[in-house]
Image: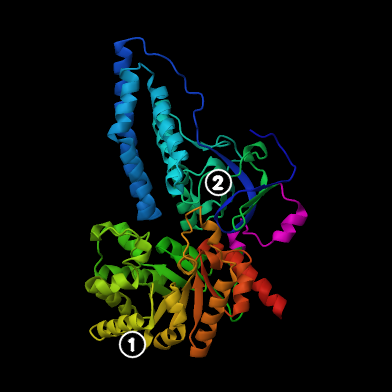
Amino acid sequence: MASANREMHEFKGLAINSGKVMARVCLYSAEKYHLVKDFTLESPQEITRDISRFDSALAACSNELERVAADVAINVGKNESEIFIAHKHVLNDHSVVAAIKKAVNTDKKNLEWAITDVFSAYEEKFATLDNEYLRDRSSDFGEIKRRLLNHLYDTRPGFVCHNQAHCTRGKDRIIVAEEMTAEMMVHMKLENVLGIVTEKGGITSHAAIIARSLGIPAVSGIRGIFDHVICGTHLFVDGDKGIVITNPTEELKRANIPAEPADRNEVCLLVSPPGMQVMANTSHLDDVKLAATMHADGIGLFRTEIRFMQAERLLSADEQYDYYAEAVRCMGDRPVTFRLLDVGGDKELPFLRIRKESNPFLGWRGARFLLANEDIFASQVRALVRLSRHTVANILIPMIIDAAQCRTLIDAIRGIMATEPAHADRVRIGVMFEVPSACLQAAEILKCVDFGSIGSNDLIQYLFAVDRNNDMVSQDYDPEHPVLWSLLQNLQRDAAAAGKPLSICGEMAGREGMVSRLIDTGITTLSVSPRLIPRVRSEMTQKAGATV
């Protein structure tokens, strides 16, 4: 552990989630149990005792994982809760259980050592695999091991200074930990955390996915960070570049202002410059409420499929309407744009029993799914157009591939509207530009719709034929590439010619330095994670001031 060190040190790691933040440190201990004792059980009674202890710990941890999964499904999302269901399956896997019991029964090893030995072997084996996704899964075995040992030792991971008066338990602090585990994410109030820095952990790890879904700036791979920080150390985190700086100088602080401030009451007073808008990307009502608190100019993207994932079933039109109406109510007179079900790729609805595809990102998803599932599509459209009785209903169609497909879906929406009491003049239909073929037909498509939205994450992936989670090709996932910027300029030109508004969402819109460049292309409506609104709006304001 570090002593009080006031020297500035700069580290370069792996950018897990975008955003900049400057705040004090909270150290989090995951209780790795490096010094588990290894001894031989001397009698049959000791062996029976340890087997009984293992069975009890197994049952207790399984029940705990079920409770955690249920809590995460409600408060974070169904996808994220699957992490803990997967942990339960691994914990109860026949091979794992048999290996631990063999170590106790046959090798006569004490239970704590048997658990450590078996799970560490799995962890080390997965960590050496060529596949990046499976490598990142190695940390799951470490988490399960710690959970069992936590139960047996009757201790829990937590903040290093939790017994001291100055401990804030992560509130308005940057968390520094050895590893960003899913369990760690559950044990703290994430809405209060400003940033996360870890010694290890991959970009596709489950916990990294949670950090991105909540918009928390995060950097991993900072080896030796514990030698340079204590609780309360000032830290600067640049989640765009993967840079972490301890004890930043006053000059550095001034050069990087505005970083996200800890006092969000001041943030809420900010407004966007004239002619520009900072909207929010949201997945559930809690996101919408946070966006309202941040004074977002509206919701640029409401991911409706998340509610279906949480419910684990299809929702009726009435259920959907109540849910969407509550989101509209939270935002007052600010617009809310609801994206129709974007199913497929990394977003599955298991209860639909959709056939497995070898390449789901290029398969039955987005607009294709909607066209093939008329009942699901019609139910959602009916719920959304009912909103027009009281407000403007903004409907966004995902993954359009060309003008013909666009017209087919719009005709279908108009047909459903004819059977549903609605105010047609208050229903606005837009499309997402995520596929290069749609971008090449943007001029024709924009004639058919009321607005457009650029889905930057998928657009970059499809434009450069690159899997952004594959470390062998990740260098080609390049939001700086001139081809992408040429495409964005062409999209904005077509939108201006058609007199239709065009926005951009996805991680690119929230990256530091991108705001100014996007404004230069003429794209002045950006939709980002609610937590990034302060920084994006500040950069917009700086840009507007510089051009006056």
Q: Secondary structure at mark 2?
A: loop
The residue sitting at 58% across, 45% down in the picture is 221
Crowdedness near tag 2: few (<14), some (14–19) or many (≥20) residues, C-alpha within 10 Å: many
Q: Secondary structure at mark 1?
A: helix
Q: Nearer the viewer, mark 2 or mark 1?
A: 1
Q: Position of residue 357 (x, y in %)?
A: 30, 59
Q: Earlier in the sequence, mark 2 or mark 1?
A: 2
Quarter holding the C terminus? bottom right
Q: Position of residue 484 (x, y in %)?
A: 55, 72
Q: CA distance from mark 2 to mark 1?
A: 48 Å
Q: Marks 1 and 2: in contact by CB < 8 Å?
A: no
The residue sitting at 39% across, 87% down in the picture is 448
Is residue 68 placed above or below 422 in the rendered structure?
above
Residue 424: mark in rendering: 1
Residue 170: mark in rendering: 2
397 displayed left or right of 515 = left
Q: Considering depth in this image, is 131 or 152 the residue closer to the camera?
A: 131
In the rendered structure, which amino acid carries the disc numbered 2? Gly
Q: Could one spot residue 301 in this view of the protein?
A: yes
Q: Position of residue 272 (x, y in %)?
A: 59, 74
Is residue 329 placed above or below 163 in the rendered structure?
below
Segment tinted magenta in the rendering: 247-266
In the rendered structure, which amino acid carries the disc numbered 1? Ala
Q: Considering depth in this image, is 143 or 171 the residue closer to the camera?
A: 143
Q: Position of residue 517 (x, y in %)?
A: 62, 73
Query: In the image, is residue 344 part of the stretch drawn in magenta?
Result: no
